[in-house]
Image (cartoon, helix red, strand yellow):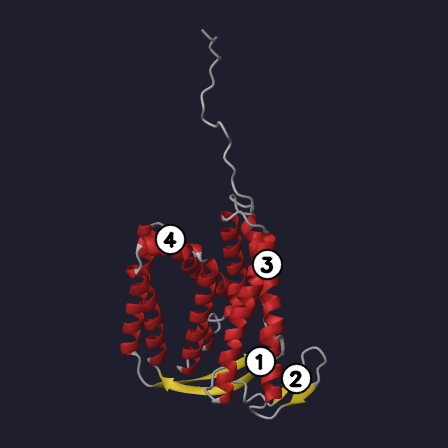
Amino acid sequence: MYTPRVPLLLDRIVTLAGVSAAAAAVLWWGRLPGPWRRGLALLTSALGVLFLLWALRAEGHREASTTAVVILGPAYVTEQASASASLRYYVMTGVCLLLGTAGLAVSDRAAGRLGRRWMAAAIALSLLVTVARFALEKAAAPASWTRPMGVTWLAPIVGAFFAVSARKEGRGLGAVAGALLVYGLVVRGLVALLSVLATAWHLGSHYDVSALVYVKNPLSARWYEFASGSFAQLFYLTLLPQLVFWPIYTVVVGMIGAGLALLLPTGGLQPRVPIVGAGVRMAPAQPER
C-alpha cells in the first residue's frame, strides 16, 4: 500500500516550526524588554481563557490510543486512554494560565536574573513539556496534541539558545557542547525516572512501557520478549535509550541548532571588544611652554 510521504514530512516541518517558536518565546522570555514580556504573558493568559471556553463547550467522552517508539523502531500501542472530552482543554488551560500568571508576576530584575540562567531555563521548560504531555495523554488528547509535547523537538532550539547565551558570555562551541550534554543527561534522566514510575505503578501514557512485552530491534529485525515490569524491560526500553542514545542525539542535533544560530547577522561566539580610542577626537600636540 502506498503511503504519501510528502504530507507527513510537511506535517513534521510545521510541527517543528511551531514548537521552535513557542520554545524560543519561553527560553528568551527573560531577555525581552518589559513591555514585550508582559504582552507575551497576556497573550498566553488569553489563550488559556480560550481553552477554558472550549472546555466548557465540550461534551461526552473521547478515547485515544497512546503509542511509544523505542529509539527508531516501530510504534507500539501502550494504552487506550478514555477521559472526558473537556479534560484536554482544562490541561491546556492550566498550562497557559500558569505561564501567563508567572510572566506577569515576575519583576524586571527577577526576569533579568532568570534570563542569565540559561541551563535552568532549558531544563525547566523541558520538565514542563514532559509533565504536560503526560497529562494530555491521560486526558485522551489526540496525537496532534501530544506529539508536539516532546523534548525531542526541543534539541535544536535549545542548542541555538545555548549558542547565543555562550556568545554573550564570550564562551566557545566547546562550552555549548558540554552544556548540551549536561542538559541531555538531566532531562533524559527525568524522563527515565517518570517512565520507571509510570511502568512500576501502571500509570499509562507512552512513558509506561509495561505493555511492551514483544519488541522488534530496528537494526537486527529480531524480536525480544520481556516480562511486564521486569528490570530487563526497564533497562532496555527505558534506561538504555534515555541515558545513552537520546543524550547523544541531543548533543548532535543541538549543535546543528547552534550552528544555524551562528549564521545570524550577530553570529559568532567571540565577545565584542571595544576599540580603544573610538570616538576620541585627535588634535595636534601643543608645544611645551
Q: Is residue 60 left or right of residue 232?
A: left
- Between the C-alphas of marks 3 and 4, the distance is 24 Å
Q: CA distance from mark 4 to mark 2?
A: 48 Å
Which comes sooner in the sequence, label 3 or label 2? 3
Q: CA distance from mark 1 to mark 4?
A: 37 Å
Mark sitting earlier along the chain (1/2): 2
Residue drawn 47% across the image and 68% down it? 126
Q: Which mark is residue 216?
A: 2
Q: Earlier in the sequence, mark 4 or mark 2?
A: 4
Task: Tell me the kind of residue under disc 1.
Answer: Thr
Q: Earlier in the sequence, mark 1 or mark 3?
A: 3
Q: Disc 3 on helix, strand or loop?
A: helix
Which amino acid type corresponds to the residue marked 3 in the rendered image?
Ala
Q: Residue at x 47, y 86 (%)?
A: 204
Residue furthest top in the image? 289
Question: Badge 3 is on which residue?
Answer: 177
Tell me: residue 34, above or below residue 289.
below
| Coordinates of residue 37 in the picture (x, y in percent) | 34, 55
Q: SS class of the residue under badge 4?
A: helix
Which residue position holds label 1? 238
Q: Is residue 87 above or below residue 107?
A: below
In the picture of the structure, the residue carrying the numbered disc 4 is 112
Q: Position of residue 259 (x, y in %)?
A: 58, 53
Q: Nearer the viewer, mark 1 or mark 2?
A: 1
**Residue 93 in picture, x, y percent from top left:** 32, 72
